Structure formats: C-alpha cells, structure tokens
Image (cartoon, rainbow, N blue to C red):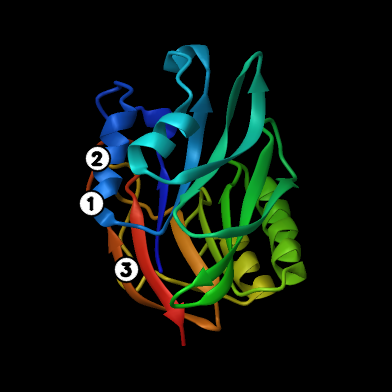
Amino acid sequence: MRIISYNTRGSLGMDDKRNTLRVSETLRPLCADVICFQEIHSRLPWSGKEDQPDVLSRQLGRRFYFHNCVQFGFGQYGIGIATRLPVEEVHHHPLPGGKEARGALELRLRNCAEIGKVSIFCTHWGLSEEERGLQAEALAEQIRLGPHPVIICGDFNEGPEGAAVTKLRTLAKLQDCAITPEPTYPADNPNVRIDYILCSEALICRQYETVYSLASDHLPIVADIETK
C-alpha cells in the first residue's frame, strides 16, 4: 500500500499564492492508495471560500474524509484523508489542545492487498511541548484500543528525537517509516523533519521518499508499506 502525508497549508504555496490544483498535480503522479492531509480549509474567507475537501476529492479521484478541528463561522479548518480503498469505519478523535483544537482522524480499511485490514490515522499536533505530550498519550491510547495494525501520518511539529514523538512510538509500539530520513520543512530550504509516517511493528516499509514541491511550505512524504 502506498501512503502519502502532506501538510498543504490550506493550499498556500511558497509564493504565497493559493492553488489547490498545484497540490493535486504534485500528488497525482505518485499514485497513492491513501493520502493524509494536514491544514485543510473548507469555505474559509481567506482561502476564497473554497471547499478543499470537495476539490481535492474531484481532482484526485478519491473519496475524501474530513475532520473539522476549528470552526470559523461557516468555514472549517482541519485534517483529512483521501483514499481509493474500501473504508469499513470512520472515527473522529479529539485530542487535548492549547489555543487551537487538535484531533486525529481514523479510517479503518479492509481488503488492502498488501496488508488486509489496517487503521490509518491522520493528525496535526500543537506548537507547545506540553500539549504535544498530552496529544501523544491520547493518540497512543486510541491506537491501543484499535483492532488492526496502524499507520500514523502527520505533522508533529517536532523532530524525531522530540519527547512527544518518542512517547508515541514507545507507548504505541510504532516504527518510523523513514528509511532515508530527510528534512521536510520549510519546503524551499528544508532543515528539520517534523512530518512523519509511522507504522505498527507488524508492518514494514519497503520504500520511502521525500518529494520536492513548492505547493506548500512542507514537503510531502511517501511510503510503500506491507505486512512483514
């Protein structure tokens, strides 16, 4: 199964222009089964009231599942997962937050050729170390309660040696899919890795790639994952 994690910054590129088509054109050639998005806008005034979940669904030819984290009038801001694989269940998990509400979106998939049943989590953690620690604990608990192997995608807002990332990996028994770790932020001069794809120890990552693109201030990451 091929999976992508990408913080699209509401489709705001490094040139400070919003262009959702540019995001889709970056992702489409990668032929992913599942794409996890952070910073998705739905009808927000500052992004032209564009319904990005609907636009991305049509442009990528995949069903889009949206998790609203913050409500602004009629507009919404959150995370999402687009997939062409059959979805068995959808779960929305609120996470402890600081000034900004945070969450995790979980899709339980069935009949994934290389894996069988698997749970995909997409999340975007907070800016303070304290709230990230609480979010790691809450997410690990949801992972432990689930019935399937898991793949976790997200912008964790800290490096791989960070306390919260370490806590999540330890509590939930996860491995980092980054075979060849490369920085993911900022896109025009990446110097830190804050975007991740993690997976259960029952799974294995066969290929991992960081993709160059200026469609956002983060770089998308891609992993090919299967059962050991």
Identify the mark at residue 29; answer none if there is no mark. 1
The picture places residue 67, in percent across and down from the top left corner, at 62, 39
CA gap, disc 1 and disc 3:
15 Å
Q: CA distance from mark 3 to mark 2?
A: 20 Å
Q: Secondary structure at mark 2?
A: helix
**Secondary structure under the numbered disc 3 in the rendered image:** strand
Residue 214 visible within the image: yes
**First-in-chain label (3 vs 2):** 2
The quarter of the rendered structure image containing the N terminus is bottom left
- Residue 13 visible in this rendered orientation of the protein: no
The kind of residue tagged 3 is Tyr
Q: Position of residue 192 (x, y in %)?
A: 37, 52
- Quadrant of the rendered image containing residue 72: top right
Answer whether labels 1 and 2 touch (C-beta < 8 Å).
yes
Question: What residue is shown with label 3?
Answer: 208
Q: Are marks 1 and 3 in contact (CB under 8 Å)?
A: no
Give the x, y percent position of residue 193. 39, 55
Asked if residue 216 lies left or right of residue 46, the reply is left
Q: Which residue is mark 2?
A: 25
Q: Residue at x 30, y 25 (%)?
A: 19
Q: Which mark is residue 76?
A: none
- Name the spot of residue 31 as percent of width and height, x first: 29, 56
Q: State the residue at coordinates (40%, 59%).
A: 33
Q: Quadrant of residue 9?
A: top left
**175 vs 67: above or below:** below
Residue type for callout 2: Glu
Q: CA distance from mark 1 to mark 2?
A: 7 Å
